[in-house]
Image: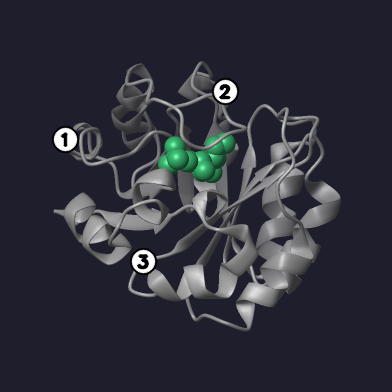
């Protein structure tokens, strides 16, 4: 069965503790970190992640949309990250990032922008626990899914057996079946879960 990772970006930022309580039965919480350089938006920093860590047992799936993530790996791990994902398009070397993530005790993941091919991942991909395929241009929630990148699920699994593939961007009740049919393991869903009248029901329907 597919795992559901609601994206905090679509939650009510004035009441995050209560928002996270609504999705306690999710498989993990997806946390988007943006630096205003790698993507044209800013989101939250480690202080918010640390504050939420005290409120929930959920696995924290931290998606770093940072130009230079290396100095922040340990900081986000100490704030409570369980999985730390960097972008293959960032400016730090992937081998050093994976080593830092593993040394911190978190699981490493890589994210690919919608136009970035699987071939951008070198042999270091064998060290990854997870790969995130972006189905929108990173930076903002609430965008429409670009379906073409879903082809990369098969390519990733063929190259890296055992890797978990996450789909991020524009996942909703209409697009989730496409992702599942293409072999996705984890669906990130921001707007569809947090803006639903009943987030629990929405998560169950997405997983069906
Ligand atoms: C976009 C983020 C996504 C985003 C998904 O840069 O990485 O995680 O929050 O939001 P929805 O589900 O609303 O497309
Ligand atoms: Zn994300």
Residue occupying image coordinates x 68% and y 67%: 49
Residue 173 lies in quadrant: top left
Q: Residues within 10 Å of mark 1 (few under 14, many from 20)?
A: few
Which label belongs to residue 181? 1
Residue occupying image coordinates x 82% and y 39%: 68
Indicate the position of residue 30 as horizontal and vertical percent values.
Answer: 51, 55
**Nearer-N-terminus badge (2/1):** 2
C-beta proximity under 8 Å, tags 1 and 3? no
Indicate the position of residue 86 as horizontal and vertical percent values.
Answer: 65, 43
Quadrant where the N terminus sits is bottom left
Residue occupying image coordinates x 20% and y 40%: 180
Query: Which mark's residue is nearer the viewer, 3 or 2?
Result: 3
Residue extending farthest to the right is 71
Q: Residues within 10 Å of mark 2 (few under 14, many from 20)?
A: few
Indicate the position of residue 136 as horizontal and vertical percent values.
Answer: 48, 26
Residue occupying image coordinates x 30% and y 49%: 185
Q: In the figure, 51 relative to 37: above or below? A: below
Q: Is residue 179 left or right of residue 43?
A: left
Reading the image, the residue beneath label 2 is 120
Give the SS element for disc 2. Answer: helix
Indicate the position of residue 46 as horizontal and vertical percent values.
Answer: 76, 63
């Amino acid at each position: 069965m597919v795992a559901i990772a609601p994206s905090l970006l679509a939650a009510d930022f004035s009441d995050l503790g209560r928002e996270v309580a609504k999705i306690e039965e999710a498989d993990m919480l997806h946390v988007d970190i943006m630096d205003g350089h790698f993507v044209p938006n800013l989101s939250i920093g480690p202080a918010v992640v640390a504050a939420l860590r005290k409120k929930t047992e959920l696995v924290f799936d931290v998606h770093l949309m940072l130009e230079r993530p290396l100095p922040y790996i340990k900081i986000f791990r100490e704030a409570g990250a369980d999985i730390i994902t960097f972008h293959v398009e960032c400016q730090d070397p992937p081998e050093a990032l994976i080593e830092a993530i593993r040394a911190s005790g978190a699981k490493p993941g890589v994210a690919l922008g919608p136009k970035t091919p699987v071939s951008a991942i070198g042999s270091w991909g064998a060290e990854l626990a997870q790969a995130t395929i972006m189905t929108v241009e990173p930076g903002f929630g609430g965008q429409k899914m670009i379906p073409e990148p879903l082809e990369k699920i098969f390519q990733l699994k063929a190259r890296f057996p055992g890797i978990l593939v996450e789909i991020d961007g524009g996942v909703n009740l209409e697009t989730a079946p496409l992702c599942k049919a293409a072999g996705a393991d984890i669906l990130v869903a921001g707007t569809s879960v947090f803006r639903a009248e009943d987030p629990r029901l929405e998560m169950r329907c997405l997983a069906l």
